[in-house]
Amino acid sequence: MAATFGGRLALGLVTFGILAVCSLALMLLGRRSETYRGLTEKEPDERFARIAGRAWAGTGVVLTVGNLSAFIGDLASGRSGDPYFWFVATAAITYVAFVVFWSRHT
């Protein structure tokens, strides 16, 4: 939607299409999939909680490495790397905060 309003109609339509297809797939597959139902319950059992935790951890690693790579690439291209720096810095500070928090509450 933002891309369309920003004058990039094709990008906006492609993005909307991808989101619509993913949403439809989740709706259709979610009815039959034990994994989907287990992950979307309010209080999942231990197995699904562990799966979800590992999935989020993996996603965090991918996003952090991607932003770090973009930061380094931006610096190598002679730009400031500023937008990516803030993502990486926020991720690092959040990681340390969660380690401190969970080490005291576990």
Image (tube, grey):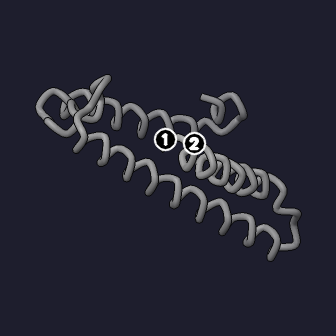
Q: Which mark is residue 11?
A: 2
- What residue is rendered at 59% in x and 52% in y? 99
Is residue 29 left or right of 74 when viewed as pictured?
left
**Residues at discs 2 and 1 in contact (Cβ within 8 Å):** yes
Q: Where 23 sits versus 88, above or below?
A: above
Q: Quadrant of the N terminus?
A: top right
Residue sitting nearer the eye, 88 or 99:
99
In the image, residue 28 lies at what x, y percent? 19, 29
In the image, residue 61 lies at what x, y percent? 52, 60
Residue sitting nearer the eye, 105 or 62:
105
Q: Hey, what amino acid is under mark 1?
A: Val
In the image, residue 20 lies at what x, y percent? 38, 31
Callout 2: SS: helix
Q: Quadrant of residue 26?
A: top left
Is residue 71 left or right of 48 when viewed as pictured?
right
- What residue is rendered at 11% in x and 32% in y? 32
